Image (cartoon, rainbow, N blue to C red):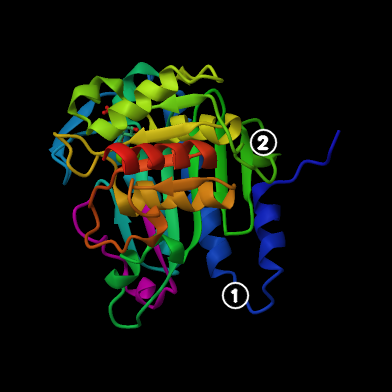
Amino acid sequence: MSEAVSLSRFILQQQRKYPEAAGDFTLILEQIAFAAKIISREVNKAGLVNILGSVESKNVHGETQQKLDVYSNEQMVKALDPTGKVCAMASEEIEEMLPVSDKSLEGKYAVVFDPLDGSSNIDVNVSIGTIFGIYKRLDDNDCEKSLLQAGQSLVCAGYVIYGSSTMFVYTTGQGVNGFTLDPSIGEFLLSHPDIKIPEYGKIYSINESNYFRWPKGIQEYVNFIKQHPDRQYTLRWIGSLVADFHRNLLKGGVFLYPEDSKNKNGKLRLVYEANPMAFIVENAGGMATDGRQRILDIKPESLHQRVPLIIGSKYEVEKYLEFREKYG
Ligand SMILES: O=P(O)(O)OC[C@H]1O[C@](O)(COP(=O)(O)O)[C@@H](O)[C@@H]1O
Ligand SMILES: [Mg+2]
Ligand SMILES: [Mg+2]
């Protein structure tokens, strides 16, 4: 039986590679894992405690906020701000940049997050998640700028999946590693070292109910993979980006939330959904594009801008780009 390696020990071992490191980054990552454990506890007993359903308020996207959206957002802020290491935060659930307490103004990092991903699945006990990205502070005077950096400037990105087990998956640019929560000891333990996404996959994940609103190139691409001459593809759509992405990361495949006549820029948000996932997939050997350019090259203009997202196994994403090139 291989030795159990806790997330805390793994993070510390990574830190030792940087003798100049002061431990700020380590503390931030530890606090995100801490918030994830608290959210996981509430998710696991969601039907028993008053955390299902929605609250009156709507978020900046006009979506009715779920109680768990609000609760998860609070846990992330409560975990990050007291560190004094985070000078700015951006969350899906909050319109403006999140204010931080005075002592954090000197913080060297900025954190973006989707506190609860897959909100439409909360009340029906289907896997949901949390997504995060960490940037180095850009400018001493204007910390908000640090939140609007291109994804290629991320120093760390990860997600937590609250599914049959709770997993914490992250990368700092040197490989992608997955840790499973052992509730009996309250520790994330290394269970999926050095994850590599297969170059080819047989799974495609797209909300086909948007078919007739797609540009021709996307319709032709989906028609093609349904009648692929050599390989039998299968459709899987959970409706939680984290869960659909996680499955494809392990098994190979492609996730697509492209633009359509209703959602001109797709549905997902660049800063705290597309960028962190793109950083992870590239570090696992995969690809992420908006159909025209690499997601990580896009310079965000606003905290909540949307972007078409095509992400997953290299061959599958390249095949998609071929069809867009050919049919528009
Ligand atoms: O309802 P649709 O159109 O299938 O969209 C599902 C997508 O929307 C999302 O739920 C959006 O994320 P949030 O739940 O964080 O708002 C993604 O997780 C998922 O991939
Ligand atoms: Mg989301
Ligand atoms: Mg969300």
Closer to the observer: label 1 or label 2? 1
Task: Give the residue at mark 2.
Answer: 185
Residue 108 shown in magenta = yes
Q: Residue furthest front?
A: 326
In the picture of the structure, the residue carrying the numbered disc 1 is 22
User: Looking at the picture, how far across and down is residue 262, in whole percent?
Assistant: 14, 34
**Mark-to-mark CA distance, 1 and 2:** 28 Å
Extreme residue in the bottom direction: 140
The residue at label 1 has a CB less than 8 Å from ligand 3: no
Q: Earlier in the sequence, mark 1 or mark 2?
A: 1
Tell me the quadrant of ligand 1: top left
User: Mark 1 near mark 2, Cβ–Cβ under 8 Å?
Assistant: no
Q: Which image quarter holds the N terminus? A: top right
In the picture shown, does residue 82 fall above or below 34? below
Q: Vertical placement of 18 versus 190: above or below? A: below
Looking at the picture, how far across and down is residue 63, in whole percent?
Answer: 17, 36
Which residue does the image show at 40% across and 74% down from the upper left? 137
Residue in the image at 33% along x and 47% along y: 290
Which amino acid type is marked by label 2? Ile
User: Label 1 sits on what residue type?
Assistant: Ala
Q: Secondary structure at mark 1?
A: loop
Specify the segment rendered in magenta. Answer: 94-113
Quadrant assignment, res 98: bottom left
Residue 296 position in % (x across, y down): 41, 58
**Residue 50 at least partly seen:** no
Which sits in the foreground, 209 or 96?
209
Q: Is residue 309 magenta?
A: no
Query: 1 or 297: which is nearer to us?
Result: 297
Around disc 1, counting alpha carbons within 10 Å, would you say few (fewer than 14), some (14 to 19), or many (20 or more)? few
Q: Residue at x 20, y 59 (%)?
A: 96
Badge 2 element: loop
Indicate the position of residue 46 as horizontal and vertical percent values: 39, 23
